[in-house]
Image: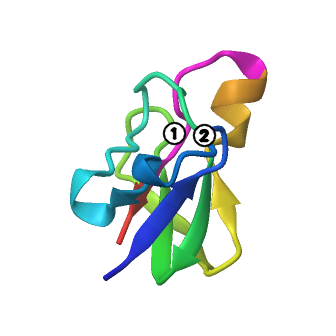
Amino acid sequence: MLRTFHCIFSDPASHDTVASLSNDVGEPGDNFYVVELGEFEIFVSKNKKKARKVATIQSGSSFGELALMYNAPRAATVTV
């Protein structure tokens, strides 16, 4: 099972499975994630063009920080 950990929360109950993780462009940036296990792909779309894969992240990597730091919508889509 792939999982991510919400760094903002210290409660183990705050773990999400990938099935319930929604992290799409334009959504509110309300969490910062660190990959505990597995691999995720990062996609970015500019000027309403087809999204392109810009990175693959693995255990120990993180995502979601920009939306939190700048109080802005998500700038990328994260998928399994």
What residue is rendered at 62% in x and 81% in y?
Answer: 59
Q: Would you say residue 66 sits in the magenta stretch?
A: no
Quadrant of the rendered structure where residue 8 is?
top right
**Extreme top residue here?**
71
Q: Quadrant of the N terminus?
A: bottom left
Q: Image height check: is 24 above or below 4?
A: above
Left or right: 25 with respect to 19? right
What residue is rendered at 52% in x and 32% in y?
Answer: 74
Amino acid bearing label 1: Lys
- How is the protein colored in the picture? rainbow
Using the image, tell me which numbered label, if any, was put on residue 9: 2
Q: Image height check: is 49 above or below 43?
A: above
Residue 2 in the image, given as x and y percentages of width and height = 37, 77
Nearest the viewer among 32 and 27 is 32
Considering only order in the chain, which callout, 2 or 1, is on the residue closer to the N terminus? 2
From the image, give the main secondary structure of the stretch colored magenta.
loop
Residue 57 in the image, given as x and y percentages of width and height = 60, 75
Element type where label 1 sits in the image: loop
What residue is rendered at 48% in x and 81% in y?
Answer: 39
Front disc: 1 or 2: 2
Q: What is the span of residues highlighted in magenta in the rendered image? A: 70-77
What residue is rendered at 51% in x and 45% in y?
Answer: 76
- The residue to which callout 1 is attached is 46
**Extreme left residue here?**
19
Q: Image height check: is 24 above or below 13?
A: above
Q: How many numbered marks does the figure carry?
A: 2
Nearest the viewer among 61 and 79 is 61
Element type where label 2 sits in the image: loop
* Category of crowding for the residue at label 2, using alpha-carbon neighbours closer than 10 angstroms: few (below 14), some (14–19), many (at least 20): few
